[in-house]
Image (tube, rainbow, N blue to C red):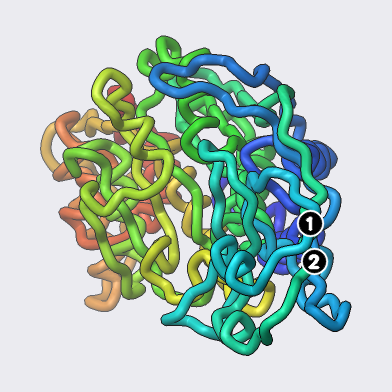
Amino acid sequence: MYTQHNISGQSAYSLLKDLFPIARSLTGAGVRKTLNRIKKIIPIDIKEVSSGYKAYDWIVPDEWNIKDAYVLDPDGVKIIDFHCNNLHVLYYSTPFNGVVTLDELKDHAHTLSDKPSLIPFVASYYKKQWGICMSHDQLVSLKEGDYTVVIDSTLKPGFLTYGEIIIEGQSKKEIFLSTYICHPSLANDNLSGVVVTTALSEYILSLKNRYYSYRIIFIPETIGALVYMSKNLPIMKQNIIAGYTVTCVGDPGNFSYLMSKYEDEYVDRVTLHVLNSIKSKYHTYNFLHRGSDERQYSSPGADLPIGSLMRSKYHVYPEYHTSADNLDYVTPEGLNGSIELYQKCIDVYEINKYYKAVVIGEPKLSSRNLYPDTFQEKQLPEVNIILDFLTYADGSNDLIDIAEKLRVPIWDLYDLVATLLKIQLIVECKRV
């Protein structure tokens, strides 16, 4: 049941490459195309709500689609081409077709003066305006004259689209995974989250005798989370015991963990134990450093136990929201490490229970073939870990507690638990 791998970092990277050119936004054909590609791998339900739908304090905007965007300089040379890099347009830009002066062009151009060689990702979801994006170096090199600007987009009533898969287990209690699909050609933020969540869905589907159920969604950030909660919050509050916003999981950097709101949820215990056990450097952030859909899931009235296990956190890595967040920045190794780490967390949720020894005093291990016929000093650790485990298996400690008291990773105890259950030296008491 444990340490299975159904999709490698390399195959996740191949999926990421397939999805990378698609121009995604809050709504539109790019989101549908992305979800339909994912549906070929896992059985997600694709759902839609209409523009104008009210989700708490927010309203679903009109649907935005784009066919083309370009700029011609005074000599008729195409200096910006949406089809070369889809970050070149202001996302949710209103359509525009006209000739403007250089000063007018600059009024509608978005650049990063502190990263002058990079194209920024900029969006204007709730304010109607037209705009383009380019490197600051390119902007300052433009000559005086008239520029032809074409933004072939539409903004009209339509739908917000999202994907959902509910994987049932023995229990109605759920582990929740949420990832966002609204960003265009940005590899780490957040195509990495999309492909890792797809891989984890495959892994969960493969698990035999799943105990927990899993609620997994692919949504537009912020408005998508609010829409989903507006339709599902009562059952989410009733069933979700732990969850993650899956984002920024593809780069080669160290792991990061954004703690839950009060840093004392089950998701924090599980994730920190796994991070500490893999003996890799990582950084923790408190909830004041939140920046994605955990803002909605943990807001007053929702109060869901959500963390975010990442590599380089959004806003922190310099490539964030720029053309440098590309296929070179995300690696198969980075994706694979994140998949494996999340798999370890899923395994912990599945196996973690309270156990109780059934024998008073130390059991006679030799009668159960757990003690060597001829004892040697080097065999002492093998015997001690059994006795130490049984010492703390008093019904008051779950498996994470026992692992931390014994100072071992929880997965080092999986086989021992199976053995002790089989020979009836311990019994399962309860779930967390």
Read off the residue under disc 2. 148
| Residue at x 58% of width, y 40% of height | 128
Q: Do we see residue 138 in this rendering? A: yes
Mark number, residue 98: 1
Q: Residues within 10 Å of mark 1 (few under 14, many from 20)?
A: few
Residue 251 image point, x, y percent: 53, 72
Q: Which mark is residue 425?
A: none
Residue occupying image coordinates x 48% and y 81%: 115
Per the image, label 1 sits on a secondary structure element best described as strand
Of the 4 image quadrants, the one containing the N terminus is: top right
C-beta proximity under 8 Å, tags 1 and 2: yes
Measured from the top left, where is residue 17 in percent x and y?
77, 64
In front of the other: 371 or 167: 167
Q: Residue furthest right?
A: 76
Q: Image check: 85 left or right of 225?
A: right
The C terminus sits in image quarter: top left
Q: Compare residues 402 and 289 and report the one nearer the observer.
A: 289
Q: Position of residue 429 (x, y in %)?
A: 28, 23
